[in-house]
Image (cartoon, rainbow, N blue to C red):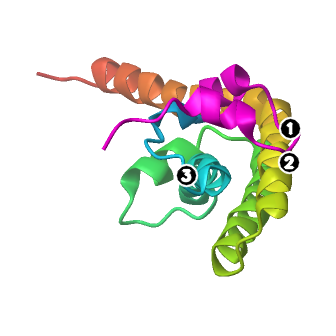
Amino acid sequence: MKDVNVKEEYNKLKYKLPKFEELNNDFEIDFIKEKIFLIRQVRRKINEKVIFFCRIIEGLLYPTQQHIINVTEIKNFSDEKKKEIEKIYKKLMVYERQSLLLDVYPDDKKDAEFINDVFNFWKKIKKEMEEVVVLMKETWKKEFSQEKNNYFG
């Protein structure tokens, strides 16, 4: 089977969609290998990132003792920041379920709407998600710093 030129096939789609390069940069749609049901595949690829960030946020908002990573990281978040990411989480979950529904009842026009909606939403929240990830990372710098200062060996 010959690999498809996703960019070329994407640009042939009859719907008004984000520029290929911009969408590909954030959602890596160039990894799609077949042109059959291309718009559906693009939606699913975008939804992979939606699901990924839902799981990250979910772990922060609803940590369990079994997941010490999330329990540790959430300590670094203010109540205000938790509320902000909860709003993002809820919106991402709506998109995730919307994509699920489109797998039950495929509809190219609704796939195109989904792609545009998520793309525009992602542009709005990208900076906030960066802040979340930085806070997560900073937690571990603090933990490491505290370990070094508490070493009695």
> Residue at coordinates 51% horizontally, 29% vertically from top-left?
5
Task: Find out whether the residues at labels 2 and 1 contact each other: C-beta distance under 8 Å.
Answer: yes
Query: Which residue sits at x=86%, y=38%?
Result: 120
Residue type pointed to by label 3: Glu
Marks 2 and 1, Cα distance to the nearest angstrom?
Answer: 5 Å
Residue at label 1?
120
Q: Secondary structure at mark 3?
A: helix
Mark before the other along the chain sequence, 2 or 3 = 3
The percent coordinates of residue 130 (x first, y second) are: 66, 27
State the image coordinates of residue 84 (x, y, percent, origin top left). 83, 46
Spatial CA distance of label 2 from label 3 is 15 Å
Residue at horizontal 71 percent and vertical 71 percent from the top: 102
Determine whether, in the image, residue 146 is placed left or right of residue 101.
Answer: left
Task: Please state the horizontal and vertical placement of residue 83, each as a whole percent of the image.
Answer: 82, 52
Magenta residues, as a range?
A: 1-26
Q: Residue at x 61, y 27 (%)?
A: 7
- Is residue 19 rendered magenta in the image? yes
Q: What residue is shown with label 2?
A: 117
**Residue at the spot of label 3:** 48
Choose the circle earlier in sequence order: 3 or 1: 3
**Label 2: few (<14), some or many (≥20) within 10 Å?**
few
Q: Nearer the viewer, residue 130 or 83?
A: 130
Q: Around disc 1, counting alpha carbons within 10 Å, would you say few (fewer than 14), some (14 to 19), or many (20 or more)?
A: few
Quarter of the C terminus within the rendering: top left
Amino acid, disc 1: Asn
